[in-house]
């Protein structure tokens, strides 16, 4: 299932060049921010991870489908209550988020190629 919300892009009504710039920055920010999330998860720095994940959710929601944003919301909740969830389940959730981010980044790249 796709992660990119094409309708959201169209709602902005940008010219092709503006859209390219915005989505290029969005794509780079996704990769950079998710890398920071991975580092924080690896360090088990839960407090900072929650802050970064919350900010990531806001940025991601610009062009991601609601289902991806909802996934991040659930991950945030689970992380806040991390004592009740096994480390294996949390690791699987972060792996799923990684895959969703990779898909979103690839979909943005494909979209950008289409408007080039």
Image (tube, grey):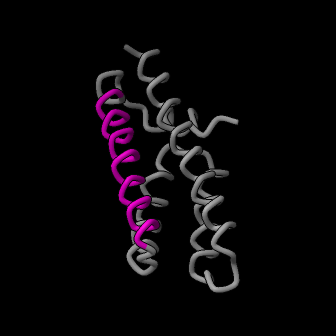
Camera-nearest residue between 45 and 11: 45
Q: Position of residue 100 (x, y in %)?
A: 58, 45
Query: Which quadrant would the N terminus be assigned to in this image?
Result: top right
Q: Position of residue 108 (x, y in %)?
A: 47, 31
In the rendered view, does 100 fall on the left or right side of 67? Answer: left
In the rendered view, does 71 fall on the left or right side of 15? Answer: right
Instruction: Give the prevailing secondary structure in the magenta stretch.
Output: helix
Q: Position of residue 29 (x, y in %)?
A: 34, 47
Asked if the stretch drawn in magenta spans residue 113, the answer is no
Asked if 19 appears above or below 84 in the picture, the reply is: above
Camera-nearest residue between 30 and 65: 30
- The total of numbered circles placed on residues is 0
Query: What's the residue at 69%, 78% (across, down)?
Result: 85
Query: What's the residue at 58%, 35% (across, down)?
Result: 7
Camera-nearest residue between 72 and 36: 36
Q: Position of residue 34 (x, y in %)?
A: 42, 53
Query: What's the residue at 63%, 72% (across, down)?
Result: 87
Asked if 78 appears above or below 39 in the picture, the reply is: below
Query: What's the residue at 48%, 35% (across, down)?
Result: 9
> Which residues are the magenta region?
20-43
Asked if the stretch drawn in magenta spans residue 35, the answer is yes
**Quarter-wise, where is residue 83 in the image?**
bottom right
């Amino acid at each position: 299932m796709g992660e990119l919300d094409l309708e959201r892009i169209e709602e902005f009504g940008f010219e092709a060049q503006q859209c390219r710039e915005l989505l290029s920055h969005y794509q780079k920010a996704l990769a950079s921010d998710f890398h920071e999330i991975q580092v924080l998860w690896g360090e088990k720095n839960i407090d900072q991870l929650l802050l970064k994940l919350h900010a990531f959710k806001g940025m991601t929601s610009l062009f991601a489908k609601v289902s991806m944003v909802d996934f991040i919301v659930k991950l945030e909740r689970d992380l806040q209550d991390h004592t009740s969830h096994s480390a294996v389940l949390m690791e699987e959730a972060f792996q799923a988020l990684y895959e969703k981010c990779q898909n979103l980044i690839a979909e943005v790249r494909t979209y950008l190629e289409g408007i080039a």
